[in-house]
């Protein structure tokens, strides 16, 4: 996988954390450096941890799934991306919560990074993925976009939340489709 593809996956995966950060920004009256660090470290850390766990799980079962790895990667990315698009189009508002407490942030970090676990599994079955680079890029991208989302939410409101989720979902679906088409020999990059 190329750096650009890994970066696009990182951006796509970070959109849930970005959307939650926008909501946090909406509900926080005065932002401080600790707020940016809190969302960045929680969301970025879990977005890096989950694909690592997924990669370890996928690696353990790699010999059983090698023949269908491209279908698994496509299916997982389609499911994750489709769900993000559905959430973005639903127009449902997430409840704003200004708590940055351990329990609140832990639950949000886990909830926003479950899809990264599935992507980590697909990393294990694809032959050309630099998992260390992918994990670092996902964590760093999510850290930055979470901090940016916090500021955007605080300044502009929820105007960009749904669009960000839709864009992230489309990116993941397109990358999944590219993986499938490459492994089937339909396209070659």
Image: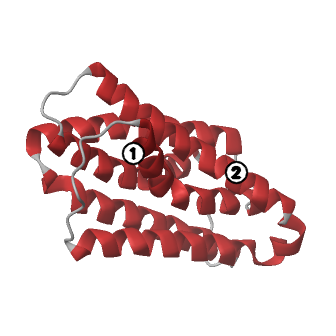
Q: Write the residue at 23% across / 58% down.
A: 95
Q: Nearer the viewer, residue 16 or 100?
A: 100
Work out how far the residue at label 1 is from the one at label 2, CA to CA, in angstroms: 22 Å
Badge 1: residue crowd in 10 Å (few <14, some 14–19, many ≥20): few
Q: Write the residue at 65% across / 56% down.
A: 120
Q: Is residue 97 visible?
A: yes
Q: Write the residue at 49% across / 69% down.
A: 80
Q: Position of residue 155 (x, y in %)?
A: 10, 38
Q: Position of residue 15 (x, y in %)?
A: 37, 53
Can you tell which quarter of the image residue 58 is in? Answer: bottom right
In the rendered image, the residue lying farthest to the right is 63
- Circle number at residue 176: none
In the rendered image, the residue lying farthest to the top is 33
- Circle number at residue 53: 2
Q: Position of residue 112 (x, y in %)?
A: 44, 54
Earlier residue among tags 1 and 2:
2
| Number of on-image labels | 2
35 left or right of 56 in image: left
Determine which residue is flagged by label 1.
104
Q: Write the residue at 29% across / 20% down.
A: 33
Q: Which quadrant would the C terminus be assigned to in this image?
A: bottom right
Q: Position of residue 165 (x, y in %)?
A: 32, 61
177 left or right of 14 in image: right
């Amino acid at each position: 996988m190329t750096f650009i593809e890994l970066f696009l996956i990182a951006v796509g995966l970070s959109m849930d954390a970005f959307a939650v950060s926008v909501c946090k920004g909406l509900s926080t009256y005065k932002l401080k450096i600790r707020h940016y660090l809190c969302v960045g470290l929680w969301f970025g850390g879990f977005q890096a941890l989950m694909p690592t766990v997924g990669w370890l799980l996928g690696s353990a079962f790699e010999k059983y799934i090698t023949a269908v790895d491209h279908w698994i990667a496509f299916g997982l990315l389609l499911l994750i991306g489709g769900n993000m698009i559905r959430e973005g189009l639903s127009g449902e508002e997430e409840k704003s919560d200004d708590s940055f407490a351990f329990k609140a942030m832990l639950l949000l970090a886990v909830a926003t990074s479950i899809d990264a676990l599935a992507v980590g599994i697909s990393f294990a079955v694809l032959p050309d993925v630099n998992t260390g680079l992918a994990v670092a890029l996902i964590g760093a991208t999510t850290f930055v976009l979470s901090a940016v989302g916090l500021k955007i939410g605080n300044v502009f409101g929820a105007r960009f939340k749904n669009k960000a989720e839709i864009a992230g979902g489309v990116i993941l679906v397109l990358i999944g489709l590219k993986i499938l088409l490459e492994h089937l020999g339909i396209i070659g990059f």
